[in-house]
Image (spheres, rainbow, N blue to C red):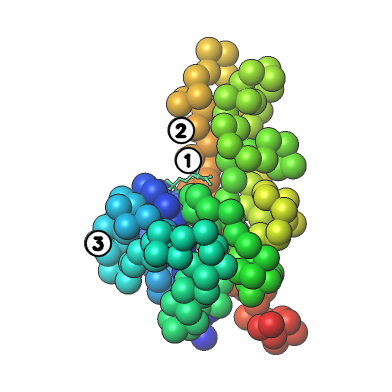
Amino acid sequence: MKPCVAVLISGRGSNMEALVKAAQAPEFPAKIVLVLSNKPDAAGLEIARQLGITAEAVPAKPFGKDREAHERAIDARLQAAGVEIVCLAGYMRLLTPYLVGRWAGRMLNIHPSLLPAYPGLDTYARALAAGEQKHGCTVHLVTEGMDEGPIVAQAEVPILPGDTEDALAARVLVQEHLLYPAALAALAEKIRLPEAAPRP
Ligand code: GRF
């Protein structure tokens, strides 16, 4: 049985779309069953629906400042859908130890830098300002520290003379769309093995 996957988004959802399309291949070792967004107006929700995936918003607003309560609502949706792996794809909320702990070893994130360089926001501008010659993206397991978990896969791109933030972001994004499905496939294969740790 292929493990079921949910993708959490907040915006345009291009990585989610790349994951869903990759998982449509019969040989892909995971099945994407659910897309959730903390933003009801996330463009990616409609894209997911058009691709035949159940896509729902779980807005944070009704939970006020109680971030863990919001995460419990998300986790309830994940459990109800039989999800075994969660992919964060442009999910713009810091997670509490509750959700990170629930999904330890089974939650991936994609970040637009060659971690551990440039965690956080504005990675393109910072890499350009520092005169770097290369940039890229990283898929990592999610731990409590922001952009700090064990690295699963990375892809590099060159920084070219005259690059702008937009040009560099577009070059990195092409690689994100290849890297994330490959990293998800690798994790899905791993958790299918009989010696994989049971769910906490
Ligand atoms: C990507 O650049 C990803 O690396 C970062 O947020 C962006 C999300 O883009 N975490 P999209 O919503 O997948 O198009």
Count of labels in the image:
3
Q: Which residue is mark 1?
A: 174
Question: Residue 195, position in %: x, y?
Answer: 75, 84
Disc 1 element = helix
- Look at the numbered disc 2 and give the secondary structure of its residue: helix
Seen from the viewer's position, the closer of residues 62 and 166 is 62
Q: Position of residue 120 (x, y in %)?
A: 63, 40
Say what amino acid the circle numbered 3 marks: Gln
Q: Residue under label 3, please give it.
A: 50
Q: Residues within 10 Å of mark 1 (few under 14, many from 20)?
A: few
The CA span between labels 1 and 2 is 6 Å
Ranked by sequence position, the earlier of labels 3 and 1 is: 3
Residue 170, numbered circle:
2
Q: Position of residue 40 (x, y in %)?
A: 32, 57
Residue 194 visible in the current orientation:
yes
Of mark 2 and mark 3, the one earlier in the sequence is 3
- Is residue 185 among what the camera can see? no
- Horizontally, residue 140 falls left or right of residue 14, namely right
Residue 185 to residue 3: above or below: above
Taking depth in this image into account, of 117 and 18 the one nearest to the observer is 117
Q: Residue 87 at x, y = what percent? A: 53, 62
